[in-house]
């Protein structure tokens, strides 16, 4: 059986490889693209189904050139490496936690529910951000297009316009892992395994988001957006720390609130609470205080 130290090592390995592979992504993408081209997999005319697949500016052709093939292969390998380190840690955590000899930190009911509310809200914000175009996310941007079979067309240029959650922080998907991880470490009892998993992921969120910003400063690509003047403008108008751009006048909190759709936001918060409840009761193995 794994130990809390081993869990921490796996989470640290996930963090280092995730950030490290991103730091050298351009030469890896070039190598993957060249390999695919050498194998004759590039420019074969393979196309995505137009009826239900929204195309980006590159069109519907699969691997039309070596750079496109390289990016897709890189992303698949990047995901595989991260999964090989993180998933075993997540799978082993409940058993390691159950075997812990130290007594968990006891919370009063009000404290438990307060921590649960923080973790649920953080989950909800991350879920809501999936509908928020951002250059730091692989989620595409879409706009209405009545002529399209799906009624929308892909426009990744939308990612470069601060709106809604990206007015609050340019990292609305990942930074909520920080309050989520801290709250769950407390809810789970604050023992070694709890800190290794939840605080380890919180530290990764901060380091990973900071690494993205450093890549942009080094003129590298992020997400699905290449470095250009519009990306520079996005960075100049947004902040790493939540609400910092609103406090210094670069963004408006009122505008951010107005641009977040109320219905989807409420649904995201409700789903966040449901996911958090399942996380605690089904994975961690906790019951709420009576």
Image: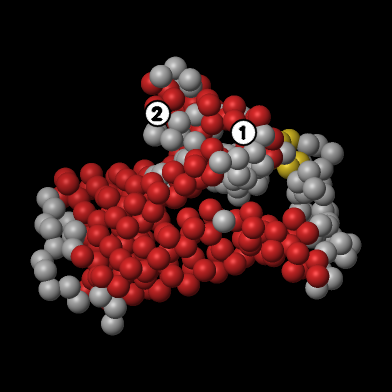
Name the element at disc 1: helix
Q: Is 5 left or right of 51, judged from the image as shown? A: left
What residue lies at 54% left-to-right and 31% top-to-bottom? Answer: 235
The residue at the far top in this view is: 249
Q: Which comes sooner in the sequence, label 1 or label 2?
A: 1
Q: Is 4 left or right of 92, judged from the image as shown? A: left
- Residue 11 at x, y percent in the picture: 37, 64
The residue at the far bottom in this view is: 1
Q: Residues within 10 Å of mark 1 (few under 14, many from 20)?
A: many
- Residue 157 at x, y percent in the picture: 69, 35
One can see residue 173 in this view: no
What residue lies at 51% left-to-right and 33% top-to-bottom? Answer: 166
What residue lies at 65% left-to-right and 46% top-to-bottom? Answer: 224
Name the element at disc 2: loop
Q: In this view of the protein, which residue sits in the foreground, 159 or 165?
A: 159
- Residue 75 at x, y percent in the picture: 62, 60
Disc number placed over residue 14 in the picture, else none: none
- Residue 197 at x, y percent in the picture: 31, 62
Which quadrant is the C terminus positioned in? bottom left
Determine which residue is flagged by label 1.
231
Determine which residue is flagged by label 2.
243
One can see residue 106 in this view: yes
Could you tell me how far apart the alpha carbons at marks 1 and 2 are, in whole angstroms?
20 Å
Q: In this view of the protein, which residue sits in the foreground, 102 or 268?
A: 102
When the figure is inspected, residue 89 is found, relative to residue 174, above or below; the finding is below
Q: Residues within 10 Å of mark 2 (few under 14, many from 20)?
A: some
What residue lies at 11% left-to-right and 69% top-to-bottom? Answer: 102
């Amino acid at each position: 059986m794994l130990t809390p130290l081993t869990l921490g090592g796996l989470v640290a390995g996930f963090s280092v490889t995730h950030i490290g592979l991103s730091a050298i992504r351009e030469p890896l993408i070039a190598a993957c693209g060249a390999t695919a081209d050498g194998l004759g997999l590039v420019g074969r005319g393979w196309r995505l189904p137009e009826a239900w697949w929204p195309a980006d500016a590159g069109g519907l052709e699969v691997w039309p050139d070596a750079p496109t093939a390289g990016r897709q292969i890189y992303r698949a390998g990047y995901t595989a490496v991260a999964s090989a380190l993180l998933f075993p840690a997540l799978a082993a955590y409940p058993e390691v936690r159950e075997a812990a000899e130290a007594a968990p930190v006891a919370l009063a009911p009000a404290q438990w529910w307060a921590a649960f509310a923080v973790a649920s809200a953080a989950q909800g914000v991350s879920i809501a951000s999936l509908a928020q175009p951002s250059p730091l996310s692989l989620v595409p941007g879409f706009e209405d297009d009545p002529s399209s079979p799906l009624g929308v067309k892909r426009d990744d240029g939308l990612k470069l316009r601060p709106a809604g959650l990206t007015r609050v922080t340019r990292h609305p998907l990942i930074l909520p892992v920080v309050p989520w991880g801290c709250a769950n470490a407390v809810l789970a009892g604050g023992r070694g395994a709890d800190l290794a998993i939840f605080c380890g992921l919180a530290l990764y969120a901060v380091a990973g988001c900071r690494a993205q910003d450093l890549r942009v400063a080094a003129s590298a690509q992020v997400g699905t957006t290449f470095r250009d003047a519009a990306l520079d403008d996005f960075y100049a108008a947004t902040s790493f720390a939540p609400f910092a751009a609103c406090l210094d006048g670069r963004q408006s909190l009122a505008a951010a609130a107005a641009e977040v759709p109320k219905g989807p936001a409420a649904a995201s918060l409700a789903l966040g609470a449901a996911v958090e409840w399942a996380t605690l009761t089904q994975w961690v193995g906790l019951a709420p205080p009576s």
